[in-house]
Amino acid sequence: MPALAAAIAVAAPLLMAEQLPVVAVGERDFFHIPSEDDFRLQKIARTDHEKEWPFTVDEGYLTCAFVVGRPAVYFTEMPVEDDFDAADLRTVIVSTDPFDLAFGNLGDGGLMRKGGDIADLIRLMAPFESLGARLCEQPRGTQIGPGEL
């Protein structure tokens, strides 16, 4: 058992280093904690004929920021009132990673559509993750209108 622990201790940093960028600068640094100014926003809305919409609300914001050196995409519902508290808005992780979808969104508050299996959810989320990745290529603090990406 101690040999297994030693092997994991040696292998873990090497596996993580393989996934990190070679040169990390600013917001893409592994240890950078995103601030409000680091996020990029795009308002998105479900069209009347769209059946592949993975969220339970018809409109919201697709947001992206670099977290631990990688782009992280989220969907946040639109505020209903003008004097809203940002902490009360529901947000979900937009990802094709089954772990993110299954465990990262446990507290989604009903923001993601239920039904089907994880493969179905991955298929529904893939276009939004791709859009979010393109959004992350924009300068920090960018707010993009619908259909601009």
Image (cartoon, rainbow, N blue to C red):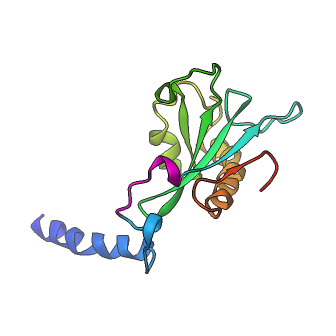
The residue that appears at 12% across and 64% down in the rendered structure is 1
Q: Position of residue 55 (x, y in %)?
A: 67, 33
Position above or below: 117 against 29: above
Position above or below: 127 against 134: above
The image quarter in which residue 8 lies: bottom left
Q: Position of residue 50 (x, y in %)?
A: 84, 36
Which residues are drawn in magenta? Answer: 31-38
> Which is nearer the eye, 75 or 82?
82
Q: Tell whether 141 sits left or right of 46.
A: left
The image quarter in which residue 17 lies: bottom left
Q: Which image quarter holds the C terminus? A: bottom right
The image quarter in which residue 59 lies: top right
Q: Is residue 95 magenta?
A: no
Q: Position of residue 67 (x, y in %)?
A: 45, 57
The residue that appears at 62% across and 62% down in the rendered structure is 139
In the rendered image, the residue lying farthest to the left is: 2
Q: Is residue 37 magenta?
A: yes
Prevailing SS of the magenta stretch:
loop
> Which is nearer the eye, 45 or 95?
45
Number of on-image labels = 0
Position above or below: 12 against 74: below
Q: Position of residue 33 (x, y in %)?
A: 38, 55
Q: Tell whether 57 sits left or right of 28.
A: right
